[in-house]
Image: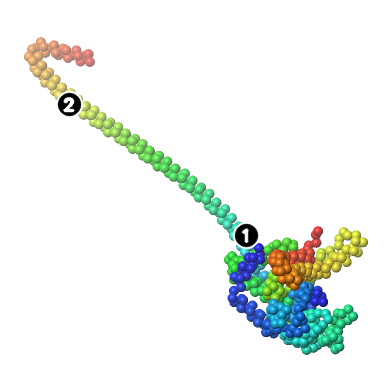
Amino acid sequence: MFQTTENKEFTKVFGLRKILLFGLFFCFVTAFASTEHEEAHDDHAEKEEFNAGEMIMHHIADAHEIHFLTLNAGKENEKHVTVNLPVILIGDGAVKVFSSKHLYHGEALHLEEGHGFAYGNYVMVDEVIYNKEEGGDHGIVRDEAGAIINSKPLDMSITKTVVGLLLSVIILLWIFIAVGKAYKKRGHTQAPKGLQALIEPLVEFAHEQIIIPSVGSREKAAKFTPFLLSVFFFIWIANLLGLMSFLGGYNVMGSMSVTLVLAFFVFVITNINGNKHYWKHIFAPEGVPFAIKLILVPIEALQIFIKPLVLMVRLTANITAGHIIILAFTALIFIFGQTSAVAGYGVGAGSLIFMVFMFFIELLVAFLQAYVFTLLSALYFGSAVEDGHH
Amino acid sequence: MILLNLLAAPLGLIIWTSIAFIIVLVLLKKLAWKPILNTLQERNDFIDKSLKSAEEAKAQMGQLKSDNEKLLAEARVEREKMLKEARETKESIIADAKKTAASEGERIINSAREEIEKEKAKAMSDIKTQVAALSIDIAEKVLRSELSNKDKQAEIVEEHLKQSQLS
């Protein structure tokens, strides 16, 4: 229900001016980019086997370009519609900035394993950029197990996920600063209007239904509310953005790095605010025999770290899994399509129904994961500031 | 191989996320959550206050209504009293007038009666006087005739003496 009203409001709210601003953002991104290019396609000119696993992973994993679509796939004049993103590398006390087109359209490496590109002093294998090393295969040194042991520069590139992240942040700030302004302007004597009226029930829901009951009381929750509300809407918006695959299929909350940061914030806030009762509960539980304490205390102590880690893994896994399922149904069409066109169309019809179904499930999951993350964070904060009585 | 990238948390992205999220936190805290939550709280308080004052106004209205009714009842009683008094006054005035009229009438009748008595007495005395004069006249005439006879004179004197002795 939230989704449908939101979508309706979105078209109303995001007028021409705002769409133009979005355009501006993309101009910034594409300053480094060429949007269309012809793939240097010499070696796999012969028909390629469709690899579902690779296709799915390619869509989920981070990349240094945004790949929108492929025209004339598998033919001589195959074209990829992409946005090349800026690559920012920090290493040896120097910052190097260049467009990713130099990697993707530079020297393609023919490796036994993974896709490799080289540019200048760098090689990129499966989207990880390494310093080129002397010796080895195309400047890549591997250990006995086949893992690359090249040294790496700090990759601060604006990758696909960073773009998704920044887009989410811009949308988030955009919506809520506008709403905040509306509240300042209209005060408490006027009824909410427009975007404000759309957002108010969501904020009220998050505040009254998630945050206050989980932390314990309105007074205790006040300190954590800004963080929790920010996290809730940040995750939700990023998840919804990830579902709009036509924008490039950002997998923001499916990236460990992003959820790691959020979980780290939860970890820090929980333990900074932990009161005497919280620490006593962990290290000196009352009314527990000494023998059990020996087992209980280490477990409780580990919980301090396990709780945020679980938050992190749950969010990443759920969002990634959702993307994988939708992509798997898509892959199914191509797998059957390779054996015969009729089977492809037949399976396609069935897959489509499942994909639409899954999409709705994903809309729910997008909200649910934001809800769960906020709820559990609030519970952890609540346990940290709980008064000492059981 | 690319699968491992999913599980990796590249440092670059961690730094980007941290920067982005801290910006989000700072900006939203100041520009969104503070005005939104404050206004919501203010509005809640305002609604509470308004409901309370409405309730009070209702009670006051009830009080006013009962006061009005009391006043009305009092006015009604007052009116009744005034009407009654007016009626009484009217009646007393009428009664007084009647009484005065009666006594006046009586006085007039009395004075008339007295006048009549007086006139009657006057008339009677007139009559008496005339009768006396007439009697004297008659008596003179009689006496004149009687005294012509000596015997008769002596008889009369006798008679008078007797009479005066008797009286």
Residue B7, image x, y percentages: 81, 74
Q: How busy is the neighbourhood of tag 1: few (under 14 within 10 Å), some, or many (20 plus)?
A: few
Residue A347 occupies quadrant: bottom right
Q: How busy is the neighbourhood of tag 2: few (under 14 within 10 Å), some, or many (20 plus)?
A: few
Q: Which amino acid is tagged 2?
A: Asp
Residue A194, image x, y percentages: 59, 68
- Name the quadrant of the C terminus of chain B: top left
The residue at 59%/60% (across/down) is B50
Depth order, front residue of A280/B135: A280
The chain containing the residue under callout 1 comes to: B
Depth order, front residue of A201/B9: B9
Checking the image for residue B126, the label placed there is 2
Residues under labels 1 and 2: Cα distance?
A: 114 Å
Q: In screen coordinates, is A12 left or right of A250?
A: left
Q: How many tags in the picture?
A: 2
Residue B117, image x, y percentages: 24, 28
Residue A92 occupies quadrant: bottom right
From the viewer's perspective, is residue B90 above or below residue A9?
Answer: above
Checking the image for residue A2, the label placed there is none
Depth order, front residue of A103/A238: A103
Residue A178, image x, y percentages: 62, 72
The chain containing the residue under callout 2 comes to: B
Residue at the farthest right position: A291
Element at badge 1? helix
Depth order, front residue of A162/A175: A162
Q: Which residue is mark 1?
A: B48
The residue at 21%/14% (across/down) is B165
From the viewer's perspective, is residue B143 above or below residue B44?
Answer: above
From the viewer's perspective, is residue A246 above or below residue A365?
Answer: below
The residue at 27%/31% (across/down) is B109
